[in-house]
Amino acid sequence: MTPKDISGLIARVALGDRAAFDLLYQSTSAKLFGVLLRLLNDRAEAEDALQEVYVRIWQRADRYSASGASAMSWLIAIARNHGIDRLRARKDGHQDISQMPELEDKDPTPEMNAMASSERVQIDICLDELDSNRAQAVRGAYLEGYSYQELADQNKVPLNTMRTWLRRSLAKLRECLDNA
C-alpha cells in the first residue's frame, strides 16, 4: 500500500468510514505493533497498546493533514508516543520483567528477528554515521523511551542542546535513509 493510499484511508476514517478503518488496520498494524513491541519489550502489553493506538487513530483521524508529515510517520508517532506514555507509567510502580531473571525468556523475540531485516541494517549503518553521543541519544529517545530531559542529564548538556542534537540527527538519518 502506498503512502498516498494510507493518507486516503486516514481521510476516510476521519469521515467515520469503518471499512476504511478496517483496511487501515490491516495495512499498518504490523508496523505499528513492531514499534510498540520494540518500545515496550512485552508482547501482551504491545498488543493492548496497539488496540489503544487504533482507538486514538479513530478519534483523531480528522487532525491528520496530508500536507504535513507522511501518513505512516503520523501513525508511527501516535504509536510511539503512546508506547512512551506506557513506559513512563510503568516506571511509576511496576517492576520490569527484565529485572526478574527467572522469568526472562532467552529465545529470540519477533522483534529481534525483525531487527535482522535489511531495513534495520540500513538504520544501523546510518546511525553509525552520526557522532557516537548523538547516535546514543537518538537510540535512547526513540528506541528506549527516554525523555529529552533524561538524555540531557545523562549527557550533561542543556535541554535545548539535546533537542538540537536530536533534531539535527534525525535530519541526517532521514537524508541517509533517503539516499540508501
Image (cartoon, grey):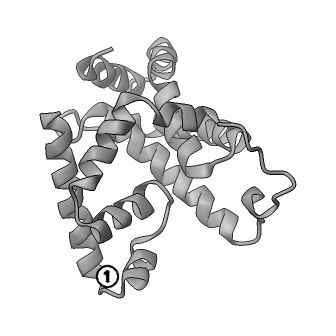
Q: Residue at x 50, y 31 (%)?
A: 114
For residue 156, above or below residue 130: below
Q: Where is residue 166 in the image (x, y as percent from the top left)?
A: 27, 65
Q: Residue at x 47, y 14 (%)?
A: 23
- Where in the figure is residue 45, as x and y percent of width and height? 70, 44
Question: Residue 109 at what x, y percent from top left?
Answer: 64, 36
Q: Is residue 86 above or below residue 23?
A: below
72 displayed left or right of 65: right
**Res 144 visible:** yes
5 and 30: which one is in front?
A: 30
Say if residue 54 shows up in the picture: no
| Residue that appears at 65% across and 37% down | 108
Residue that numbered label 1 is attached to: 159
User: Could you say which is closer to the camera, residue 24 or residue 63?
Assistant: 24
The kind of secondary structure element at disc 1 is helix
- The three-letter code of the residue at mark 1 reads Leu
